[in-house]
Image (cartoon, rainbow, N blue to C red):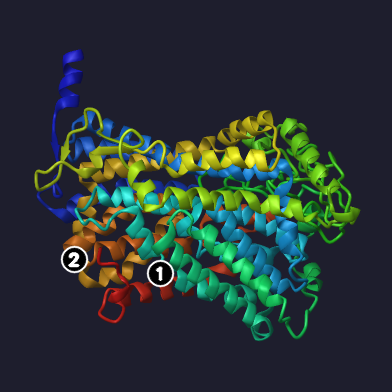
Amino acid sequence: MAAMADRLLAEQFQIVTDPVADSVALSAIFAVLSLLTLFLLLGVFRVRAWLAGVVSLVVALIVAVTVYAMPVGQALLSASEGAAFGFFPILWIVINAIWVYNLTVVSGHFDVLRRSMERVSPDMRIQAIIVAFCFGALLEALAGFGTPVAVTVVMLMALGFPPLRAAAVALIANTAPVAFGALATPITTLGTVTAGASTDPRLNTDTLGAMVGRQTPILALVVPLVLVAVVDGRRGIRQTWPVAVVAGFVFAVGQFLASNYISVPLTDIIASLAAAAAVVLLLRFWQPSETPDLSEEVSRERSPASLTTVGRSAGTVGPAAGSAGPARGSGSGNPSGAADGRGGASTEDGPGGAGTGSGPDAAGAPNRSGNAGGAGNAGDPGGSGDAGTAGGSDGAGAGGGAALGGPEAAGGAGGDRARPDRAADESARAGQGVAGRAEGGVAGRDAPVEVARAYAPYLIIIVIFAVANLGPVKEALAGEPWTVVFRWPGLDVVGVNGKPLASTNFTFGWLPAAGTLMVIAGVLTTVVLRVRPGAALRAYGRTYVELRHAIVTVMAVLALAYVLNQSGQTSTLGAFLATAGSVFVFLSSILGWIGVAVTGSDTSANALFGALQVQTAAKAGLDPLLLAAANSSGGVLGKMVSPQNLAIAAGAVGMAGREGDIFRKVVLWSGVLLLLMCVIVTLQGTPVLDWMVPSE
C-alpha cells in the first residue's frame, strides 16, 4: 500500500491541452464543467459559497484524473498547494486586516472616525461621497469582503437616506477600490496564478498592480458623479459637481501614484485618505448653492417592513441587531439575505454573517437620541438592542453595536437568540469611554485626541508598509531566512514544453507578507487605542470565527484554481478562447465581470480566470499583462450586481427579499461602467493607449 502511494506521488505529469479525441473544442467541454458547477450552484441554486467551492473542486479533480489522466496523487497535491496558498498569504492578509478593523470597533474609535466624516457637510449628496466613496474605500482597503457595503449602507440610512437609495449608493461606490481591497489581496492572487501560467516577467504583484492602477483610476473619476446623480439627479450634479470632481480626481491620482510608485497594498488607503482630505479642504472655501432636504423622500421609498425595522432602537437594521458592520460570510443564514431578521445577509464569500458596526441610531440616526446599544437579543427579529445607552446626539457610546461574533457567526442558521456577550460589553464600555472624553462634555463632539487615535491605525499601516517597501528593506526581506522558496513536496508537473511549472514552487515570505505586517500594525494599534491585551486576543479569535466559512471558501476556490491550471484544463479553455483572436481584448473585462458577479469576489474571479486570461493572450497574440489586469479591473464592476453583495445591502436596510429592486437600481450603472472599462482596455491594446502598459 505504501509503495503504491509512493508511486502515485512520485509519478510526473505533463500537461496536455487536447486530451479528448485530440480536439481542443471537445476537451473544453470537460474543462469548463467545474466552473459551470460553481456558477450554477452559486447563481442558480444559491448554495452556500463554501459548499459550492468544495463541490466544484471535487468536479475539477474528477475531470483532471479521468479526462486529463493526471495521477490522483498529483491532483491532490495540486489542490493542497492551492489551499495552502489560499490561507497564506491570501487569508493571512484578510484575517489580520479585519482584526485591525475589529480593534477599532472594540475600542469605540470606529464610531469616532465615522462621526468625524459625517460632520464635514450636512448636504446628503456630499455625505454620499464622503461616506460611501471615501470612507467605503478605506474600509475596502483594510477589510474588503463585504465590509464597505455592510457598514456604509447603514451609515447612509442613519444620515436620512431612503433604504433603496442608500443601498444603491453603497453598492455603486464599492467599485473603483475593489481591485486593491484587503491590502491588494486580489492583485496578490492574480500575480501568483498568472506567474505560474506564463514566463512573462511582468506578471507579478507590483507590475500587475501598476497596470490595474492605470485602469481603475479612470473609473474613480466617474464614480462620485454617478453617486451624486443617484442621490439627486441632474440637480445634484449641477450643484455639487466640484466636490465630485475633486474627490474622483484626487482618488484617481492617489490610486495611480500609490500603485505605481509607492506600494500596491497601500493603494486604497492612500487614495481614500487623500480624497477625503481634499473634500474637507474644498468645503472650507466652497459650499453648494443650496442643501435640499432629501430625507423627505424616505416615507415614499421605505416599505412598511423597513420602517418597522428602522424604527426600533439601534441594531435592528441589518444582519444582526446593532450591526452595520461586515457580514463577512461567516454565518449560515438563508442565501437570500436576512429575511428573518436574524443575520442571513449573504456575503462575499458565503451566506450569513456576523455584523460588526453600528445600528442606525448608533450611527447617528435621525432620532439622535443616543440609544446606541446593540448587545441585546441580536438574533431575535424583534431584538431591541438595548444593552447600552451612550448619550449624546450621535449615539456616541455604542462603539460598534452588536458583538463581533453575532448569532449567525456563532451558531449558524439555528436562529438561536444571541446573548450580550463579552465582545458587546467591551465594545459598549469602550464606546462610552470615548464618549465620556468628548470635548468640553458637548454631546456628540469628540476630543481632538480621540479623533487622532481613530485615524492612527491607518497611519500606522501606511508607515509600516512604506518602510517594508523601501528598496534595501524590501530586498533584504525577500531573501532567507525571512522568505523561503521551496518546491511543493511531491508535486511534479511540467508544461506542454516539458519544463516544470513555476507554480509548483511555493513562496513562504513569513515576515514581509502583508498579513504579518498587519499583525505588527495590530499590536501597535492595541497600544494606541488602549485596547487591553485580553480584549485584543478575544477580538482576534472572534475574527477567525466570523470568517470560518470564508476561510473554507477561499481555500477551496484557490485549490480549484490550482487544479485547473496544473492539470491543463485552463490551458484547454485558453486555447479555445484564443480562436476569438484580437476580439478577446474587448471580452477580457467581461470575463472578469462574470466571475465577480457570480462569486461576489474579485479575488476568486482572479484565481479562476487569471491564468486563463494570460494563456488566451499568449495564443491570440495579445498582451498577457493587459488581459490579466483587465480581469481584475472589469471584475470590480460585477460586485454591485453579485447576489452576495445585493443580499448584504438588502439585509442591512431592511429590504431582505427585495434584492431585485436594488438590482434594477444598479444594473444599468454596472453595464455602462463595464462598457467604459472594455473600451479603455481595448484602446490600451492598440497604439492609441498602448503607452499606458508597463514594458517591464
Q: Where residue 564 appears, x then y in whole percent? A: 27, 44
Q: Is 581 located above or below residue 46 in the figure?
A: below
Nearer the observer, 342 or 29: 342
Q: Quadrant of the N terminus?
A: top left
2 or 1: mark nearer the eye: 1
Nearer the observer, 147 or 40: 147
Q: Which mark is residue 167?
A: none
Left or right of 85 in this view: 162 = right
Circle 2: element type: helix
Q: Where residue 323 appears, x then y in whole percent? A: 71, 47
Which residue is the site of mark 1?
Answer: 215
Q: Is 135 located above or below residue 411 in the figure?
A: below
Q: Quadrant of the C terminus?
A: bottom left
Q: Where residue 312 appears, x then y in whole percent? A: 83, 50
Mark toward the start of the polypeptide (2 vs 1) = 1
Q: Residue furthest front?
A: 472
Q: Residues within 10 Å of mark 2 (few under 14, many from 20)?
A: many
Which residue is rendered at x = 39% and y = 69% of the image? Answer: 214
The kind of residue on which mark 1 rests is Gln
Which residue is the site of mark 2?
Answer: 620
Circle 1: element type: loop
Which residue is rendered at x = 70% and y = 54% of the image? Answer: 452
Q: Is 27 located above or below residue 588 in the figure?
A: above
